Amino acid sequence: MIKQTLFFTTPVSLSLKNSQLVVAWKDREDTVTRPIEDLGCVVLENQQIHVTLPLLNELVKNNVAVILCDNKQMPTAMLQSLDANTTQAESLKFQLAVSEPMRKQAWRQVIEAKIKNQAAMLNKAGKDGSVLRPFHQNVKSGDADNREGLAARVYWSALFGQGYKREREGASPNDMLNYGYAILRAATARALLGSGLLPNLGIFHKSRYNAFPLADDIMEPYRPYVDEIVYELCEKGAVELNKDTKAELLRLLRCDVHIGKVMRPLQIALTFTTASLVRYYAGETKKISLPCMI
């Protein structure tokens, strides 16, 4: 089942009643309800939103990604469950015991899939995706020769032009990419927790200031799906991050993703990937199920 994404931009009051999220407004008597079990992501953007603790507990208990935004309307935090999976102890045991060679092989698979998807994205945009073929062929264990970084320079110039520079604080469309990646990161963390894995223990990304390094690792091959939406927005004339472009970016969680021999909405595909990562950690498979953009 495809979970719903709720996006709140006005000062509403959110509470819990009969396992339903209740939305109320100060200047209106009517309310709107949504079953908690149907929700996958809740984005709280307005700084005057009132939300009750029982509702937050119920959302977290149902593994709903609750994303908090700052006064610039950018995602800054996500609530994390401490008990999101009944087999978490077993999954965590495998995650903690994974060897360094297995980590490096996992990272090789992730980077190879990411660059292949970037090449597919260029093709979809009418560019020459074959320019990335030398980078995704024969990626070494642990991406020892940094093909990811080398491919990125070629990719961004081909997609948005020679003058474009991918920077977190850079000019548009960097702001739209940042927002899309933040939503993707939260959805990835949600899928990891649902599979009993800790997003805090990464394969490659490691930082004392990063709470979700494993989410940053696993989301890499999914980034081109954000790029595709942003590219389409730019082609339509969008020049800034606003309510309309945010609504389009939230469509990300429902976009079709080929994974294995099936096609699934992105938020479901993420659960395929994280479940396969558990099997990889346990030694049951040597291949992680990763998305393939066509």
Image (cartoon, rainbow, N blue to C red):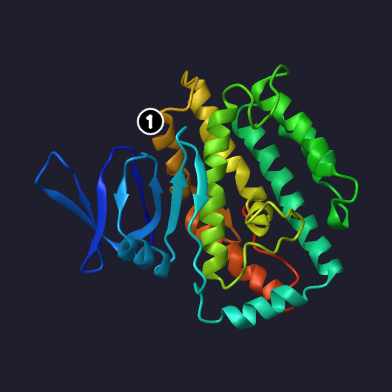
Q: Nearer the viewer, residue 246 or 108?
A: 246
Q: Nearer the viewer, residue 204 or 67?
A: 67
17 is higher (above) or lower (below) than 170? below
| Residue 265 visible to the viewer | no
The residue that appears at 37% across and 39% down in the rendered structure is 47
Quadrant (top left, top right, bottom left, bottom right) of the N terminus:
bottom left
Measured from the top left, where is residue 232 in percent x and y? 51, 28
107 is higher (above) or lower (below) than 28? below
Measured from the top left, where is residue 75 in percent x and y? 50, 42
Q: How many marks?
A: 1
| Residue 214: quadrant of the picture | bottom right
Measured from the top left, where is residue 233 in percent x and y? 48, 27
Residue 52 lies left or right of residue 97; in this view the side is: left
Label 1 sits on residue: 243
Q: Nearer the viewer, residue 95 or 286?
A: 95
The residue that appears at 52% across and 37% down in the rendered structure is 179
The residue furthest left is 29
The residue that appears at 53% across and 31% down in the rendered structure is 176
249 is higher (above) or lower (below) than 138? above
